[in-house]
């Protein structure tokens, strides 16, 4: 299951007694969290496994009190108090974001920083963490999925996305900073940084190729490295440069190493390396180009 960017609907939550022992009491009008009452049995995670829940990286469901699983200290950023926003529903043990709701800081405070009901496979007691600001037209988007996790060390989100085709496997990792997300309604990728794309091809005649592309933001230039299994690597200052030069650079390197590039053996090393190079340029010369 891949990372999702989805528009989410408003969910009204009912206030309940203070169960969230990690809510920062320094937040204005915060409820009293000095005493944590014993949850009722109805709030214990004692349900049978949801079909497919293994894909979320969750441990098997056992009799445990979700409200007592710590999520770490948390103070919502100032942007969380600027109206509606996207609030992530985070499992306190795994950090996985199961869904995103439209809410306000008042929703967060009234519910003591926790979901009071099960939501998209995350049981009652899952954490609410501010993720995205609303755009100028009032729209709210959010990121969730098995590879999307909350990073409590800096209150950011790690956005993962893995896909597999017959051509190979692509894995994208990136960092979302909630306070920098879009407000102008134009670019929903605002707030996403440190983008790393890795493509590992399926094998051709026992060989594969790996491409690694690094970007600070989606609008910035990328640095691209192409590594051929058991052979050479090529580095470029952009994927544009890679797409324009890789195939000719491969031929030049093969020629320097004494290979016959005019009449290569069918299914041999030269033909295999060329096919792998063409696979990389055909995929990353367009769809994943930064421009």
Image (spheres, grey):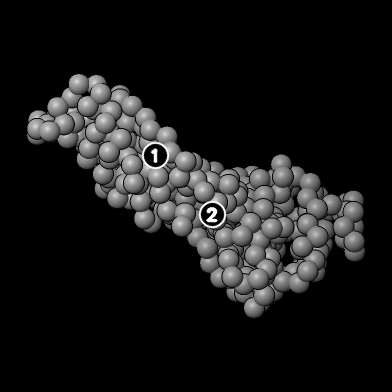
> Along the horizontal axis of the image, is 254 left or right of 53?
left
Label number found at residue 171:
none
Disc 1: which residue? 211
* Residue nearest the observer in this picture, 45 or 190: 190
* Residue nearest the observer in this picture, 111 or 105: 105
Is residue 196 something that shows in the picture? no
Tell me: residue 113, above or below residue 62.
below
Residue 233, quarter of picture: top left
Residue 108 position in % (x across, y down): 76, 64
Disc 2: which residue? 218
Residue found 57% across the figure and 60% down from its top: 189
Residue found 81% across the figure and 60% down from its top: 78
Q: CA distance from mark 1 to mark 2?
A: 17 Å
Residue found 76% across the figure and 72% down from its top: 83
> Along the horizontal axis of the image, is 182 left or right of 285?
right
Is residue 140 something that shows in the picture? yes
Do tag 1 and tag 2 residues touch (Cβ < 8 Å)?
no
Position of the N terminus by quadrant: bottom left
Residue 70, quarter of picture: top right
Q: Mark 1 or mark 2: which comes first in sequence?
A: 1
Residue 15 position in % (x across, y down): 78, 68
* Residue nearest the observer in this picture, 231 or 199: 231
Residue 95 position in % (x across, y down): 62, 47
Tell me: residue 238, above or below residue 31.
above
Q: Secondary structure at mark 2?
A: loop
């Amino acid at each position: 299951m891949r990372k999702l960017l989805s528009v989410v609907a408003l969910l009204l939550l009912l206030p309940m007694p203070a169960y969230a022992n990690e809510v920062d009491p320094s937040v204005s009008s915060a409820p009293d969290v000095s005493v944590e009452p014993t949850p009722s049995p109805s709030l214990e995670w004692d349900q049978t496994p949801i079909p497919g829940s293994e894909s979320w990286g969750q441990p098997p469901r056992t009799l445990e009190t979700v409200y007592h699983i710590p999520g770490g200290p948390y103070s919502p950023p100032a942007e969380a108090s600027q109206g509606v926003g996207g609030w992530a529903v985070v499992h306190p043990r795994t950090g996985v974001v199961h869904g995103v709701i439209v809410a306000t800081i008042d929703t967060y405070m009234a519910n003591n920083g926790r979901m009071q009901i099960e939501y998209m496979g995350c049981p009652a007691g899952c954490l609410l963490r501010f993720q995205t600001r609303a755009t100028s037209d009032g729209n709210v988007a959010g990121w969730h999925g098995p590879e999307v996790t909350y990073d409590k060390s800096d209150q950011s989100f790690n956005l993962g996305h893995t896909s597999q085709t017959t051509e190979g496997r692509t894995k994208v990792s990136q960092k979302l900073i909630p306070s920098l997300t879009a407000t102008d309604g134009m670019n929903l990728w605002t707030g996403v940084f440190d983008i790393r794309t890795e493509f590992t091809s399926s094998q051709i005649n026992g060989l594969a190729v790996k491409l690694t592309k690094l970007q600070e933001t989606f609008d910035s230039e990328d640095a691209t490295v192409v590594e051929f299994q058991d052979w050479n690597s090529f580095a470029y200052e952009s994927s544009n440069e890679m797409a324009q030069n890789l195939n000719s650079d491969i031929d030049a390197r093969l020629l320097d190493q004494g290979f016959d590039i005019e009449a290569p053996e069918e299914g041999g090393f030269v033909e295999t390396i060329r096919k792998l190079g063409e696979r990389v340029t055909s995929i990353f010369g367009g769809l994943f180009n930064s421009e």
